[in-house]
Amino acid sequence: MIEQLRGLKDRALAQIDEAADLEALTQLNVSILGRKGELTATLRGMGSLSPEERPVVGQVANEVKTAINDAIEARTSALSGAEQQLKFAREAVDVTRPGRAPFTANLHPLTQVVRELLDIFTGLGFDIAEGREVENEYYNFEALNIPADHPARDMQDTFYVAPGTVLRTHTSPVQVRVMEQTTPPVCVVAPGKVYRHDSDVTHSPMFHQVEGLMIDEGITFADLKGVLHSFIHSYYGPQTGIRFRPSFFPFTEPSAEVDIQCVFCKGAGCRVCGRTGWLEILGSGMVDPAVFGCVGYDPEKVQGFAFGLGVERIAMLKYGIDDIRLFFENDLRFLKHFG
Amino acid sequence: MKISLGWLAQYVDISESPEELAHLLTMAGLEVSAIEHRGEGIENVVVARILEKGRHPNADKLSLCKVTDGEAEYPIVCGATNMVAGDMVALARVGAVLPGNFKIKKAKLRGEASEGMMCSTRELALGESHEGIIILPPDAPLGTGLLEYLGLPDHVIEVEITPNRPDWLSVVGVAREVAALTGRELRMPIPAITEAATATPASDETSVRIDAPDLCHRYAARLIKGVKIGPSPQWIQQRLESAGVRPISNVVDVTNYVLMELGHPLHAFDFNKLRGKRIVVRRAGEGEKFTTLDDTERGMGADNLMIADGEGAVAIAGVMGGQNSEVSEGTVDVLLESAYFHPSNIRRTGKELGLKTEASYRFERGADIEGLILSLERATELIVELAGGEVSSGIIDNYPTVHEKRSVTMRIEKAQAILGIEVDPAQAQGYLEGLGLTVTANELGRITATIPHFRVDLEREIDLIEEVARLKGYHEIPATMPRSGAMANTLGEAYAFTDKVRDTLMAAGLMETITLSFIDPADDDRIGLAQDSELRNKIEISNPLGRETSVMRTSLLPGLLRSASLNARRGNRDIAIFEVGHTFHPEAGTDLPNELQKAAGLLTGRRAPLAWWSDNDKLDFFDGKGVLESTLSSLGIKSCKFAPTEEIPWLQPGRAATFTVGEKQLGWIGEILPDILDPYELGAPTVAFSFDIEATREVAQATGKFGGLDKFPPVERDLAFVVDRQVQSGEIIGAITGMKIELVRRVVLFDAFEGGKVPEGKQSLAFRVTYRSDERTLTESEVSEIEAQVKQKLADSFGATLRDA
Ligand SMILES: [Zn+2]
């Protein structure tokens, strides 16, 4: 009987070893270990054994069963690993193919620059105000201390839509309207479109400005310098050289043009900066008392400053664009560059 | 304005290099935009004489000259015609390298040897004239270097002068600033005039009458008799050229020279052409015609100021002289005018006539009413020096409207409050005195300045504060942060909403574009607007750059079509773009339009990028609608209704909808009609949409409080119906939700098709309905009961027949 069992074991292990796939193994499992299998059939002969022999044979039978079981398990795991590998090989993909993605898009470069500017100014405590683009001459000029027949009108070539009504030439009318509706303190930035009767590679009849205004008791020219220093160092980096030089705007006094060290030549002088080493980026000044008079503020009580920047100029310098018309033509190849 | 530094140095010492001086002036508000070097590259050009001038044997248009520089004789072939034998000329000898790296070599021109070149001013970069070669005065010293003879080399700076500083519009004006900035002495020209003792006093021979003292505050004149008109000497011509003024003849050149030197415009009349030998300053008659120096007849208005003689106008005051009294070759006696005219009147006249001259430019900014006598005397001195003649005794000076000198007080404490620095009273006083102001200070920290007439810009305290800051230097003022608190961010809400519109449209794959707000009136026809359409009513620009940009848009669509068209023409036919901006709608009773903030999008071409995974499907209505719906949803619009429309002329009926929230219409969407697309070279389908951002903001809901996750599981059942093709799925969903069955939570259209087994004229629609209770788990029979009600409702309302799933 023991011989029989050992023979069964050897045969079974050989068959298991030869099994080609999981299917064959399952069949072996049934035909050897199953209820109607060989091992069961062999053990049926146990009844004719003497009580002394039974435990001995029983132990051998168990050993045989365990050995066969282990062999089947080992073989199963070997076979299934191989099969999975085959499956994976069949399902492998070309990982260099592009993924499924819809068309992508981005914001217009001018919108991006406006946002960058507004982010800095709102961080400095400015609120955002907007205004109309077709404006009364009063708000665009007179209230800003630019009377009719004044040569300062030559600084801004104006589109008229009716006598007394213009396309705003700057975002400054927003200042006046905000001051009319607010009591100090006032601290706003006004982004928006403005219009001038001018068209060439550096002038567009429509362009964008961001204007700032801060009014309160005790605001000084030194504060104007502080806020603009803070802006310029945030936008162009803390090492950027800055200079304020006297200028003239009818609605501010004292007025200043603000130059930054040329971003192309770092101040050494190049074609872009006209060999001066400096780039003009904004106009600014202390709000003129005449403007306060127009909005009913008392210049003996409050003081403040205003500044304005041209968004296209900043974008053109930032991205090295030399034709302003590219911004409004909307060639997708141009726009995508800013994605 | 161009300022020769050689000329400038006549009035103030300059020890700085041109670059240092440019920096000094720029930092004082007198921006130097360019520095030009005159006389570079003409080292080897000398004064020479033409000995002979003959015809070139082989070329009609060339002459063959023999020229000497006093050492040798050179044959020279020349194309100019303005010279004769004996003329003194500027000779570039062989070996000279002229501006522009133009090398002078021995050459054979049409068979004749040529050794050198006789030069024009342009060839030497000394002026613009190229009409002929330079003819020097007969007394020019033969063989002298031209540089030495002309007082070169020189540097010319170009300054940008702000409109508040007319006093800078002259060489002396800039010299005065240099003197103030450096503390050096200003040397004003002091004219020396010898009046002819024997001649009749000027006032016996002529007179000036001012009929419009409101517009002409002062009129002074000198009479100079017996002048000889001819070319000016080179030194004057060179200075005029350096300032960009073309030399004409001695008397006219003198008026221009003094204009550039002292900044006051003068006018010289041919005295013998003045009828009645007198001057009358008066307003023009309505409709009066006048022919100016530039040979143009101009129609005058009643408020234009004229200079007339005994019979009629001889000049437009402060703007331009007339042909009838012009100084010309035959002029013998000259009446020289130096006057003050009202700035805004001169400006209006110039604008009305479209005429801007050196004179009007200065008068409209404000001339120096006290300084005009100096200019008159200086010009008189120079005319006698250059053109001879005798000065009649006495100045005619009619000064009906005297300008009192202003006095302005500045409080030191206010200056400190504005600038944010300590201001030292003595220092401030010093700055103002340096500018030519007469200053007194008192112990209360008040500085009172008397303002000279040439400083028209100094009227108020703040003007003096600015001068103190300017002369101190802006770099002396520190940068501090304001103590002022930040404002509550409330104005910015609308802006933030608009920005969110941009972000969502971008996230949906649409590229942001920006187009000009003014469009072509013909765009109305291009998008098929009816003749009586509201949108045709536009704000028109009175002075447009061109017809194509002459009206303010009432819709963003024309701009989007134009941008799309440009890309299509350049070969990119897959386009998904949007724009956010104002549209302008005229309103009755006001010139200010209603400005609406709108967003609009346009999509055409492939649905997905060309890729291994995508097919070639073209996008259609539903791609646009998907973008629009996801945008509206992100903006807080949760229940927007779309309804078919046939009212929008540029959209294809049956593929067009308007959308509303409650009663408020937000916008439209649809496929553009192929006939409209054709001229833009765009293919169908092209989907576009537009909505009003402010209207959308009004109905947008802020994200509410979170109510917790669902506690009981939902049950989902599918319903498939066959209904008429015309039935809109939205109506069916509306009918189901309209039943107000509490347990019906969601209805989704998940399949739709026609053809195949579906009969002609019908469509199959399949919905997934989600049922859920907040109190309990629903039973199958409960759900089935509700489902039956829904089926019945749809059968009744739409004749829907249930389809086997
Ligand atoms: Zn540079």
Image (cartoon, coloured by chain):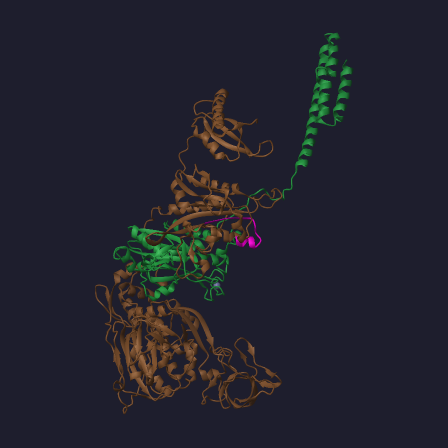
Chain colours: A green, B brown
Is B346 situated left or right of B64 in this image? left
Quadrant for residue B317, please give it.
bottom left
Picture coordinates of residue B116, whole percent (x, y):
56, 84
Quadrant for residue B293, please give it.
bottom left
> Which span of residues is magenta-colored?
B565-579
Residue B376 shows in this picture = yes
Residue at horizontal 52 percent and vertical 77 percent from the top: B99
Is A54 situated left or right of A235 in this image? right
Note whether B635 is above or below B723 in the view shown.
Answer: below
The quadrant of the rendering that contains the N terminus of chain B is bottom left
| Residue B576 within the segment the image draws in magenta | yes
Q: Nearer the viewer, residue B444 or A161?
A: A161
Picture coordinates of residue A113, whole percent (x, y):
45, 53
| Residue B582 within the segment the image draws in magenta | no
Is B133 situated left or right of B705 in this image? right
Q: Nearer the viewer, residue A295 or B698?
A: B698
**Count of numbered circles on the image:** 0
What residue occupies the far left of the structure in this picture? B443
Note whether B158 is above or below B490 in the view shown.
Answer: below
The quadrant of the rendering that contains the C terminus of chain B is top right
Is B338 situated left or right of B618 in this image? left
Residue B10 shows in this picture = no
Picture coordinates of residue A300, whole percent (x, y):
25, 57
Q: Nearer the viewer, residue A118 or B713?
A: B713
Picture coordinates of residue A115, whole percent (x, y):
44, 50
Q: Nearer the viewer, residue B554 or A208?
A: B554
